[in-house]
Image (tube, rainbow, N blue to C red):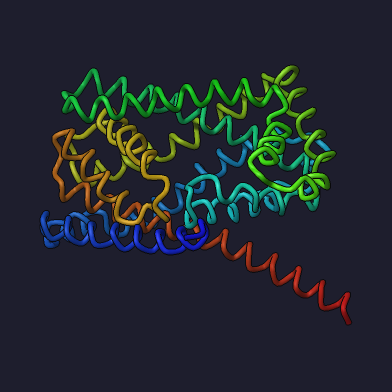
Amino acid sequence: MPHSLFRKRLEPMLMLAGLLGMLWLGGRIGWPAIRANIGLIGGWFFLLVVLYLFAQMAFMAGWWVLLGTRARRMGYWRMFGIYLAGDSINYLVPPANLTGEPVKAHLLGRSVGFSRSLMSITVHKHAEIVAQVLFLCGGLSITLVQFALPTGLWFVALGVVVGMGIFVVAIFWVLRRQAYGALLRGLVRIGLKKELIEPHRDATASLDRWLSLFYRTRMPVFYLATFWCLLGWCGGLLETYLVLQLLSAKAGLGTAAAVEALAMALNSMIFFIPGRVGSAETVRVVAFSALGLQAAQGASYGIIRRGRELVWTLPGLLVLLKMRVGIGGASREVTG
């Protein structure tokens, strides 16, 4: 079976399995208890949606600082729209946090050139992962000190952090050594025709030079981008803290950090499920239960967080629709 056909069949099956799993889990926990907890959050949901704007702006600032002054003349809010467009694709299409990056590169490349666009996105994704590892280390350290986790869950979370840390170091090493050129050569070795590679060779060489130069001369900018991304990840922590105050007044900031870190670590293992349908909700039930909170609280928070995430896909999809209509209109004008 061709890979593309296998993927088209597998993804709906994974989504259906996740949805059925979520329905089963809700029935096991009890839908009345879940509805009661969602009612405690009530209208505060809209505040959570608004507050996440600041997390998105922090991630965007991490990307913004990586572009040169001339490139930034396109304007912050226009670039923010491109960021939201890619972020929506990242959320809806697996693998999570990767599929939308080529979309960002394409949209930004119209203004600053594709090589510079892709360079900034590559470094930004690296900074985002470094910030995520730092956040996980902090959150899991708090978890270790304040809570007695099941041994298996602790080793799974620790394994995720170690794996991501190794990945971060590997990225540092690879990006300084002509990563994209090596990727093209690898594709040729496994059977891709050279004539398909040749038109991209010069652009790839230029991109590798920019990346190598950046990591040799502009590391302070990388650290600044990582700082902004870390603030972005803390947006989820703030959201979790506010929800916990509504659901369980006894839960403090340490509990919120533990919930967010555990959920983040476990979610990193299910990136291949489209939208993490069902699985993200299950992960939060596991995190809440492991920390001595009610499973119904975890399920209700999972549903509320899913709602907030879906609301935040709408601006990005609208940006994509607007740009697509603009491209289509321009094409019709040229044809006419």
Residue 191: give x, y in percent of width and height: 66, 45
**Residue shown at the point (42%, 54%) measured from the top left:** 309
Furthest residue to the bottom? 336
Work out whether 197 lies above or below 139.
below
Residue 61: give x, y in percent of width and height: 62, 37
Work out whether 28 lies above or below 327.
above
Between 130 and 158, the residue placed more toward the observer is 158
**Residue shown at the point (43%, 34%) measured from the top left:** 234
Residue 52: give x, y in percent of width and height: 46, 47
**Residue shown at the point (11%, 54%) measured from the top left:** 29
**Residue shown at the point (56%, 50%) measured from the top left:** 99
Q: Locate the C terminus and report the quarter of the image it occupies.
A: bottom right
Work out whether 10 lies above or below 126.
below
Asked if residue 54 lies left or right of residue 225, the reply is left
> Which of the 4 quarters of the picture holds residue 332?
bottom right
Asked if residue 212 lies left or right of residue 30, the reply is right
Work out whether 297 lies above or below 23.
above
Asked if residue 283 lies left or right of residue 109, the reply is left
Total marks shown come to 0
Residue 40: give x, y in percent of width and height: 21, 54
